[in-house]
Amino acid sequence: MRKLTLSGHGEGDEEMVERGTANTKMKEKNKVTSKSINRRLIDWRGVRGKGQGAGKSGSNSSSDQPVAMAVHLRLSAGRSKFEFQVKKNFANFSPKWAAVRCSDSAPSRRRYTITLLPGDGIGPEIVSVAKNVLELAGSIEGIEFGFKEMPIGGAALDVAGVPLPEETLSVAKESDAVLLGAIGGYKWDNNEKQLKPETGLLQLRAGLKVFANLRPATVLPQLVDASTLKKEVAEGVDLMVVRELTGGIYFGRPRGFTTNDNGEKTGFNTEVYSSSEVDRIARVGFETARKRHGKLCSVDKANVLEASMLWRERVTEISSEYPDVELTHMYVDNAAMQLLRYPKQFDTIVTNNIFGDILSDEASMITGSIGMLPSASLGESGPGLFEPIHGSAPDIAGQDKANPLATVLSVAMLLRYGLGEGKAAERIETAVLETLNKGFRTGDIYSAGNKLVGCKEMGEQVLKAVDSRVQC
Ligand SMILES: NC(=O)c1ccc[n+]([C@@H]2O[C@H](COP(=O)([O-])OP(=O)(O)OC[C@H]3O[C@@H](n4cnc5c(N)ncnc54)[C@H](O)[C@@H]3O)[C@@H](O)[C@H]2O)c1
Ligand SMILES: CC(C)[C@H](C(=O)O)[C@@H](O)C(=O)O
């Protein structure tokens, strides 16, 4: 199988031809209807904290904790294939006191294969914590996991010479869900394009066809003081960025380097979207908004860019399928400003690949830290990809300073959206809130009066909180 390659040197390039052919095939394949999206993404419900009111659907968390996770979205029926390609001795991976419990009382045991991609920098530290939490919450709910750890990014470059070895992609494709830490680091920053860790991540997203990236940004009541915004601005913020993930300027052709008429080196990229690509992400945006508070803001740059003009045209067209959702449009420069001025005006934002990348990082700081924000990337079929939105944080790697909660919450998204295991997901989210209620804080979310802990200790505390809620 030939891998999708990402670098190029302009028109006529072989890789561009390959991409062009793929695009034509995609056009035929990607006639995504709201029915088919509903098949995969059903029952999205806003879950609000105490005193914040229920979501539009009227659902409330069953927990009595001040749950304020932005949106809970459940996948339809569980997976049908439970093959275990990988046999592992789970005892070696379990946290020291987390034995499998309640197995007799669990209605049925389910098994899933998870691909772990720790990656670089803080990636291995945070994935190790999240894996333990996943295993414990799963065991309590009668779920067994088979894990296969594979290299990606700089770690893969070091062992295999490429940022996404073919085996990593095929193992990921065969699994039920993929958990990624982060990729990248100083060591590989000056590598040529094809040999950058980031290229491996983009190849993974393209290979898994995960076009819809959900990035919830919720200001938890416990962390309102960690926000860099004033309390009255940050308090109660609960928004979801729906980012298109496999198109736009990240993947558009032509791209590359050339020399202009003055003999100067130039670099160029192409922002390109087809109608079907916009339509399918727009529908995910509308479905998300419909299950939250019924407000969708489409962010573009339609005053300047043709790709954004098409984006706005298609989103407006698709809105006729969702008369119950209030659609607004905003230019990205204004959206960046409005996020800081009055973030509570946003419910669901749908936007392209690059604007979503930037706006979700911006939104993360409203919540206190980028170390808190999880994400789920989903396609029409196949395994989802779950990762924190932050990077490999090389400045703190190996120092036990990383906040593992974004990855722990990504594991909750994996359970809910990737496997349809909502109870286990809720167990983890509640445990995170309890841990914060007890005052445990990593450095990035620390404020006076709380207990400063490292990555490992934070993980141990979340495990204790998961464990304390066992009811056999
Ligand atoms: N999905 C990914 O794997 C991903 C995402 C973004 C950046 N990157 C890569 O990561 C590398 C570093 O990029 P960057 O510095 O621009 O962004 P970054 O997100 O890695 O770090 C930005 C800042 O946030 C802090 N930070 C990030 N995550 C944290 C956590 N969990 N706990 C505490 N603090 C945290 C870092 O210490 C740093 O000060 C680059 O190679 C970049 O390409 C990877
Ligand atoms: C590392 C990079 C390729 C990636 C992106 O731009 O999508 C990152 O910023 C992210 O948000 O996951």
Image (cartoon, rainbow, N blue to C red):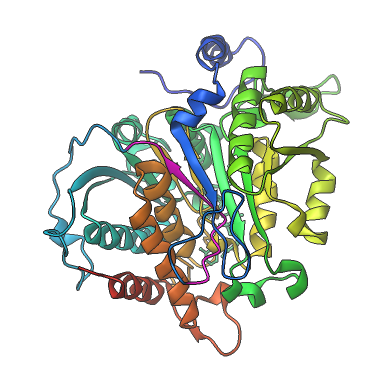
Front residue of 42/343: it is: 42
Instruction: Judge whether residue 369 is colored magenta.
Output: no
Assign the N terminus to one quadrant of the image. Answer: top left
- The number of callouts visible is 0
| Residue 144 location (% of width, % of height) | 20, 51
| Residue 394 location (% of width, % of height) | 52, 60
Q: Quadrant of residue 352?
A: top right
Q: Quadrant of residue 131?
A: bottom left
Residue 158 in view of the camera: yes
| Most common SS among magenta residues | loop
| Residue 167 location (% of width, % of height) | 30, 32
* Residue at 66% in and 77% down: 225
Most distant residue in the front direction: 58
- In this rendering, would 225 be left or right of 127? right
Assign the C terminus to one quadrant of the image. Answer: bottom left
Q: Is residue 180 above or below residue 54?
A: above
Q: Is residue 414 above or below residue 27?
A: below
Q: Quadrant of residue 390?
A: bottom right
Q: Which residues are magenta?
A: 65-77
Q: Is residue 176 above or below residue 47?
A: above
- In this rendering, would 230 be left or right of 40? right
